[in-house]
Image (tube, rainbow, N blue to C red):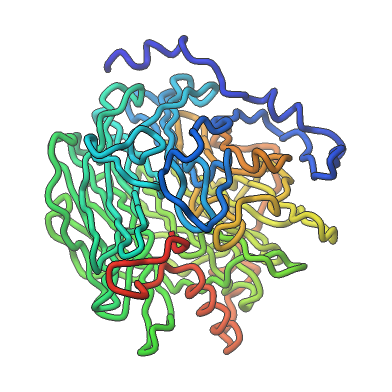
């Protein structure tokens, strides 16, 4: 190991449990805002108030800038040192796409304290023409740490002009446990008919030096969005030219590409495939994977995990949309090589509301179980994240609305961890945080905390990294972390759902199909209105 972890004593928490304790009480504040009760476990505030200068993005916009709003966190654990964690998030979210910048944070004590790091992906974090970071906005932060401890931080960067939507994918590397970051390198940059979107990066946990950056690339001429891959085999010293990993063909696109690596070295790419009719209206979506036996050099035919039948989440009283992770599945691999995939789906409520469903493969992704419902079928649940501990315990985090009341002034949401040690036959559930008022979240095509959240298994703990609202409009959201034991004992037992359990999937109805199509159409990233441009609100 390098010297990064030896400097842990230099860093102090960015708030911690004391910050949340100060805003506890009876649920009402003097300014009329809902004040959440103290969390059941002490949370650590990872983010803080914005330090960006006004106008640092050098771009005018008709959208709303939510200063000090942090959303969409990603989290990675160092396989060589479980106490070393790296997180990232969007800082200062815009309503019409992206954020002013992305920030990273590093912990050397298992998440008890964090220190912020800045990487010049965009102008507000120090990007300019000489270092390749001359972009107005950045979004979709994703971090990963490989078998040798090298960390990678990937971002989508964008600048809109009157005639172009410039989009690029960039990656920065850290060789000292996330303490410092190198100047980002550009994997792809488009200014014409293509638009690059929704990226992730996975550093290989089996073979040191390998890492896989994936995303979708929308093509205005063919109305397609193939999955793209850029690969390094030398630890990030160099990157291969970006190429198509999987092409769904014309009038179809991929979204939410994410790579996982099996213990035998097989590489899997998970994605949602959206198919369109002749009128460019979505005709359905599938959760699918493709496999590579040779570290991403070649890829096999797609395997369908299941249909994606989400209807999205809304405020039940006024219909306000919540921008959730309804089109973004999540994947985790167990020590036995078993593969787990979770996503939002309405099949167990007859299309009335989304729950979190889970599918399993015992043969490396070649075949899959029927999706089973994990969450309460009577409560909307959304934005899942998965991780598997070294002992095989599966952890699943999600938001849900069980705390909500008839009060039209608030939209109460909680954050939860469910764990199973027997392959999903029985679950225990533990509250992480909430209730908090989701209604004051930034509005970016819906109340937005992120298309995804972070979750890792670190030693004997699950560590979630998630966004929630804060009681004050000048600081709408914060990023929080907490370490929870992999086996929860004070928790509500969840009965087996679906797949032979108490709640069965229901047959699709025309109204349900309409709602699913409308949700996909609202949530997907549309094709350009004119060649070379894509409205900023679509990110």
Between 359 and 102, the residue placed more toward the observer is 102
* Residue 17 position in % (x across, y down): 67, 25
**Is residue 392 at least partly visible in the picture?**
no
Q: Where does the N terminus fall, quadrant-wise?
A: top left
Q: Residue at x 51, y 32 (%)?
A: 461
* Residue 345 position in % (x across, y down): 54, 68
Residue 231 shown left or right of residue 343 in the figure: left
Q: Where does the C terminus fall, quadrant-wise?
A: bottom left
Between 242 and 157, the residue placed more toward the observer is 157
Number of numbered labels in the structure image: 0
Residue 447 appears in which quarter of the rendering?
A: bottom right
Residue 271 appears in which quarter of the rendering?
A: bottom left
Residue 179 shown left or right of residue 299 in the figure: right
**Is residue 269 at least partly visible in the picture?**
yes
Residue 413 shown left or right of residue 363 in the figure: right
Q: Residue at x 73, y 67 (%)?
A: 316
Q: Is 65 situated above or below 327? A: above
Q: Residue at x 61, y 61 (%)?
A: 322
* Residue 531 position in % (x across, y down): 28, 73
Residue 41 shown left or right of residue 202 in the figure: right
Q: Residue at x 57, y 74 (%)?
A: 347
Residue 163 appears in which quarter of the rendering?
A: bottom left
Between 375 and 61, the residue placed more toward the observer is 61
* Residue 269 position in % (x across, y down): 29, 57
């Amino acid at each position: 190991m390098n010297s990064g972890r030896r400097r842990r004593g230099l860093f102090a928490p960015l708030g911690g449990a004391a910050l949340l304790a100060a805003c506890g009480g009876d649920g009402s504040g003097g300014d009329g805002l809902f004040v959440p009760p103290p969390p059941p476990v002490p949370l650590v505030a990872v983010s803080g108030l914005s330090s960006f200068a006004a106008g640092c993005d050098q771009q005018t916009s008709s959208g709303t800038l939510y200063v000090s709003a942090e959303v969409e966190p990603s989290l990675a654990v160092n396989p060589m040192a479980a106490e070393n964690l790296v997180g990232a998030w969007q800082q200062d979210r815009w309503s019409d796409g992206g954020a002013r910048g992305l920030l990273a944070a590093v912990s050397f004590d298992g998440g008890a304290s964090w220190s912020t790091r800045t990487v010049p992906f965009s102008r507000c974090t120090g990007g300019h023409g000489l270092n390749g970071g001359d972009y107005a906005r950045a979004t979709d932060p994703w971090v990963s740490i490989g078998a040798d401890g090298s960390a990678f931080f990937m971002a989508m960067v964008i600048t809109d002009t009157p005639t172009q939507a410039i989009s690029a994918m960039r990656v920065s590397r850290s060789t000292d446990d996330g303490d410092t970051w190198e100047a980002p390198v550009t994997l792809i940059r488009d200014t014409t008919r293509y638009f690059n979107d929704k990226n992730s990066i996975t550093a290989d946990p089996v073979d040191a030096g390998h890492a896989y950056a994936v995303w979708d690339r929308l093509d205005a001429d063919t109305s397609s969005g193939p999955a793209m891959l850029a690969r390094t085999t030398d630890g990030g010293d160099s990157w291969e030219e970006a190429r198509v990993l999987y092409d769904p063909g014309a009038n179809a696109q991929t979204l939410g590409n994410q790579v996982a690596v099996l213990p035998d070295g097989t590489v899997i790419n998970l994605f949602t495939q959206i198919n369109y009719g002749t009128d460019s209206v979505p005709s359905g979506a599938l959760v699918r994977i493709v496999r590579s036996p040779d570290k991403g050099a070649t890829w096999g035919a797609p395997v369908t995990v299941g249909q994606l039948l989400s209807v999205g989440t809304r405020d039940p009283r006024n219909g306000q949309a919540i921008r959730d992770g309804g089109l973004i599945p999540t994947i985790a691999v167990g020590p036995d090589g078993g593969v787990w995939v979770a996503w939002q789906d309405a099949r167990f409520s007859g299309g009335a509301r989304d729950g979190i469903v889970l599918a399993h493969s015992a043969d490396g992704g070649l075949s899959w179980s029927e999706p089973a419902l994990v969450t309460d079928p009577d409560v909307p649940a959304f934005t899942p994240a998965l991780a598997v501990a070294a002992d095989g315990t599966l952890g699943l985090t999600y938001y849900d609305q069980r705390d909500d009341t008839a009060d039209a002034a608030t939209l109460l949401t909680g954050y939860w961890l469910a764990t199973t040690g027997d392959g999903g036959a029985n679950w225990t559930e533990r509250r992480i945080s909430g209730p908090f008022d989701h209604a004051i979240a930034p509005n970016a095509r819906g109340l937005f905390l992120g298309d995804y959240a972070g979750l890792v298994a670190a030693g004997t703990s699950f560590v979630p990294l998630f966004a929630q609202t804060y009681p004050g409009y000048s600081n709408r959201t914060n990023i929080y972390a907490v370490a929870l034991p992999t086996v929860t004992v004070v928790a509500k037992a969840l009965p087996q759902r679906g797949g032979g359990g108490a709640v069965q999937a229901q047959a699709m109805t025309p109204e349900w199909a309409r709602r699913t199509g409308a949700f996909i159409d609202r949530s997907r990233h549309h094709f350009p209105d004119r060649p070379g441009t894509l409205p900023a609100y679509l990110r």
